[in-house]
């Protein structure tokens, strides 16, 4: 059954064979997708309920095309839901006993609303929370501590990103948890929190000099004053970044993920 309104087109499919949870499993994958993408996904999904859902989707799109004059290539599925239908009066035979009644309830309706995409300026704003910004002043501190006018701010921000990428790429085996950067006049102060400080320091501090020269080369200024402070992480097993890095390394070695998670939880 199809229905239209001033700005939307919808279609209903009733008494679809299959439980509502299995139908919702498919609807959750195509919700928010364009009409073309949804058809491609439904074609290659290994679920039996994709057939009826495809028919309902085509019905809704045909309704939007014929009654509202919308282009099918611009339609987006804004809502898709499925409810439980009445229990079927069916019995399942049993060996050496009376048959039992089947309590399966099919999906009574699958509702699909394709709509044209909204203008970019009218999209709803996301409500995501930055994990560090949520904890500033409580358990976390700013990773970059400096002030700059609007003209030089983008350049300094880019330098901070270059420094962090260089440190994590070259000294990934040192277990670096965080890189804190502070600027005082022309001096650049970098604090490295690491689980293995010996890898960074090296013999008689040779590693620090190599790191300093590498940072100066990355910034393109050989005369930049760079001060490096290496801090050892006291509790490695309580650091989220190091634990996540450990899990990633174990998975790269093709260790069973359940074993890795169990070992990580035991360590923490």
Image: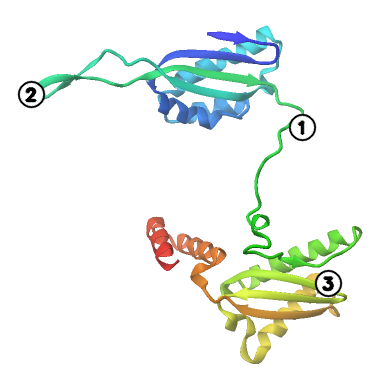
Left/right of residue 62 with respect to residue 235 in the rendered view: right
Q: CA distance from mark 2 to mark 3?
A: 84 Å
Specify the farthest residue to the left. 96
Left/right of residue 46 with respect to residue 2 in the rendered view: left
Label 2 packing within 10 angstroms: few (<14), some (14-19), many (20+): few
As drawn, 61 above or below 203: above
Q: Residue at x 54, y 63 (%)?
A: 240
How far across and how far down the image is residue 154, in percent?
Answer: 84, 59
Where residue 39 sits, quadrant-wise, is top right
Read off the residue under disc 1: 120
Q: Secondary structure at mark 3?
A: loop
How far across and how far down the image is residue 233, in percent?
Answer: 57, 75
Read off the residue under disc 3: 220
Left/right of residue 107 with respect to residue 164 in the rendered view: left
Closer to the camera: disc 3 or disc 1?
1
Read off the residue under disc 2: 96
């Amino acid at each position: 059954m199809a229905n239209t309104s001033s700005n939307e087109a919808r279609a209903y499919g009733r008494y679809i064979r299959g439980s509502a949870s299995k139908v919702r499993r498919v609807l959750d994958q195509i919700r928010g997708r364009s009409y073309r993408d949804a058809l491609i996904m439904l074609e290659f999904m290994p679920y039996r309920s994709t057939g009826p859902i495809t028919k309902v989707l085509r019905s809704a799109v045909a309704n939007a095309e014929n009654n509202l004059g919308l282009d099918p290539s611009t339609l987006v599925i804004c809502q898709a839901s499925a409810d439980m239908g009445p229990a079927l009066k069916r019995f399942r035979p049993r060996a050496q006993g009376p048959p039992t009644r089947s309590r399966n309830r099919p999906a009574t309706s699958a509702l699909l609303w394709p709509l044209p995409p909204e203008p970019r300026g009218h999209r709803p704003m996301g409500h995501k929370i930055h994990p560090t910004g949520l904890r500033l002043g409580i358990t976390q501190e700013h990773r970059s501590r400096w002030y700059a006018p609007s003209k030089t701010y983008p350049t300094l921000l880019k330098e901070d990103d270059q420094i962090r990428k260089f440190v994590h790429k070259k000294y990934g085996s040192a277990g670096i948890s965080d890189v804190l950067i502070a600027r005082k006049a022309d001096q650049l102060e970098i604090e490295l929190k690491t689980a293995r400080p010996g890898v960074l320091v090296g013999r008689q501090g040779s590693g620090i000099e190599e790191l300093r020269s590498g940072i100066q080369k990355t910034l393109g200024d050989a005369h930049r004053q760079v001060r490096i402070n290496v801090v050892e992480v006291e509790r490695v097993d309580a650091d989220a970044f190091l634990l996540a890095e450990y899990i990633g390394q174990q998975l790269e070695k093709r260790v069973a993920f359940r074993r890795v998670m169990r070992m990580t939880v035991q360590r923490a």
